[in-house]
Amino acid sequence: QVQLVESGGGLVQAGGSLRLSCAASGTIFSINAMGWYRQAPGKQRELVAINNSGGRTNYADSVKGRFTISRDNAKNTVYLQMNSLKPEDTAVYYCKAYLQLRFGVTNGYWGQGTQVTVSS
């Protein structure tokens, strides 16, 4: 069984910083990609940033230059460093990992979500 455990959310003032962490555990053959999505009230879930197995990263335009995604492959952990936070960054942030539990079969797994609230 696979678990994604997130941490690091909270309340911060505009202009502040937070760092989210997401650790994958279980019997994992390999990790293809790990990333972060967010969902604000009344809005669809959207991609924030993703880091694939080749180390390539992609960011939503709204967070480029402010957020940085990184991975520690030895710990099966992905991080999201969020700087210069804005009230519009307020959302529930979800970790997603594309995992192979056995060779050749990749599935996506979600974390439980962590609330990020940015006050103006």
Image (tube, rainbow, N blue to C red):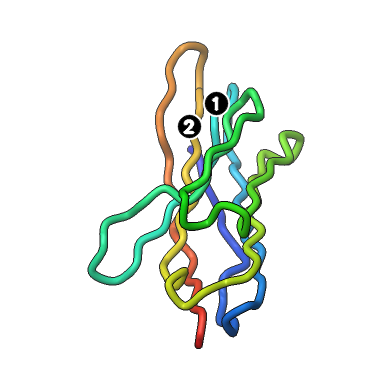
* Place of residue 35 in the rendered image (x, y in percent of width and height, measured from the top left): 52, 43
Q: Residue at x 61, y 30 (%)?
A: 56
* Place of residue 58 in the rendered image (x, y in percent of width and height, measured from the top left): 53, 38
Q: Residue furthest right?
A: 74
Name the residue type under label 1. Asn
From the viewer's perspective, tell me whether residue 1 is left or right of residue 40: right
In this figure, which residue is indicated by the disc labeled 1?
32
In this figure, which residue is indicated by the disc labeled 2?
98
Q: Residue at x 50, y 29 (%)?
A: 99
Name the residue type under label 2. Tyr
Marks 2,1: beta carbons within 8 A: yes
From the viewer's perspective, tell me whether residue 82 is left or right of residue 58: right
Q: Secondary structure at mark 1?
A: strand
Rendered position, 100 above or below 15 = above
Specify few, some or many for label 1: CA neighbours under 10 Å numbering under 14, 14-19, or 20 or more: some
Q: Residue at x 50, y 17 (%)?
A: 102
Rendered position, 12 above or below 21 = below
Residue 10 quadrant: bottom right
Q: Residue at x 48, y 38 (%)?
A: 1
From the viewer's perspective, tell me whether residue 13 is left or right of residue 115: right
Residue 16 quadrant: bottom right
* Place of residue 59 in the rendered image (x, y in percent of width and height, measured from the top left): 52, 45
Q: Residue furthest top?
A: 104
Q: Residue furthest left?
A: 42
